[in-house]
Image (cartoon, grey):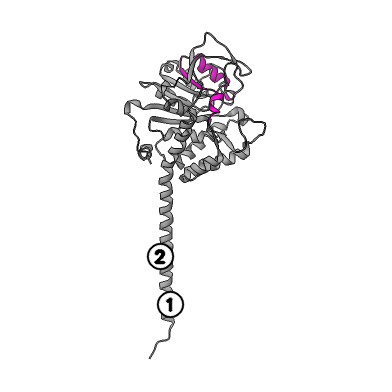
Amino acid sequence: MKRSEILARIGVAPPPAARIRLLVDTDAKNEADDQYAIMHHLLTPLFDVRGIIAAHFEQKAGYTGQSMEASYREIETVLRLADMDDVPAFRGCDSPLRSIQDAPESEGVQAIIREAGKPGKLYIAVQGAMTNVAAALNAVPDIAENLVVLWNGGGPYPEGRPEFNVMQDPDAVRAVLKSPAEVWQTDQSVYCMLEVTLAELKSRVYPCGKIGRYLFEQLEKENHVEYNPQFLLRTGENWVLGDNTTAAVLLMSRFRGNWHMEHAPIIKEDLTYQANPDGKLIRVYDSIDVRMTLEECQHRVPVIGVAQNAETALEELQDGASLVQTDLSSLALGKLLKTLEKPSQE
């Protein structure tokens, strides 16, 4: 099914001039919230999603060289369960940059270069390592003038701290911050605001067809695997849907005044920040509308779920009718056999 067909069920069509050309760049198999962010972007009619790029998470994966492929397969799974067969998925770089100037090739890098070469702004929702964006900028620096990088990562200001997405490829972050590309950052102190409970997801997301069941069940499973009492982000019955910030910053009113301009910091070796008065100005968000963002996400998934549940009910009804028909046929055959077995009356 085409994405446009599914979006039509929402019944909301933004003005054509408002639509935003977008690529989603995601380490989808890193844990369990990227899948929600993917669906949030796909189910937002405002976004002209040009594709989804798989990102690696090699630092976490132990530098096996397999993490990007795991993300790619997870993207394919989400698209299949969402019944969207016209959204392209691209393999990204399979490892961090070897230097700040490195420009490895991949399908995802080529997709960025291709889309950024078209007229108008291209927004890239970066939900993991910055590798693919940095590689594209290093390969074709001129695309920077058309790029807006939605960076979900980095520690809180002013000091910063080692943060997961930066840890996956620090040189890629350094390359993007040094480039002329526009950057909108939601750091760790902001994306941690997007907190939900498992009970909330079980009630609102799980009933929404096969995609809803998958979103909830994979997160619940990951919660048991990932839980660590020393990791203060999680309590055991909560989760942070932090990657949804890349949708939120595009949906929120620009009049909110919930961001400020900051000189891009230098990322030091310990991954903290060093003030850089000569750095380019980047937009840094101070807060996110948590209610709007989470309600947005959780109210869009049922658009697919209603149709999928209806299809499942129809299939069950047809299966039931088939069983009834089989039972009636068996009953009729049984009566016929009994009649034939009776001795004839002469």
Residue indicated by mark 1: 337
Identified at 61% across, 33% down, the residue is 234
**Disc 1 secondary structure class:** helix
Q: Position of residue 70 (x, y in %)?
A: 54, 35
The image quadrant where one finds the C terminus is bottom left
Could you tell me if residue 54 is visible in this image?
A: no
Give the residue at the far bottom of this rendering: 346
Identified at 40% across, 72% down, the residue is 332
Identified at 45% across, 41% down, the residue is 80
Identified at 62% across, 17% down, the residue is 269
Q: Is residue 304 left or right of residue 263?
A: left
Residue indicated by mark 2: 325
Q: Position of residue 222 (x, y in %)?
A: 59, 38
Q: What range of the chain is rendered magenta? A: 167-194
* Count of labels in the image: 2
Q: CA distance from mark 2 to mark 1?
A: 18 Å
Q: Is residue 162 magenta?
A: no
Give the amino acid type for the residue marked by disc 1 in the picture. Leu
Q: Is residue 168 magenta?
A: yes
Residue 200 vs residue 151, the one in the foreground? 200
Q: Is residue 99 left or right of residue 260?
A: right
Res 13 quadrant in image: top left
Could you tell me if residue 86 is visible in this image?
A: yes
Which mark sits nearer the N-terminus, 2 or 1? 2
Give the residue at the far left of this rendering: 16
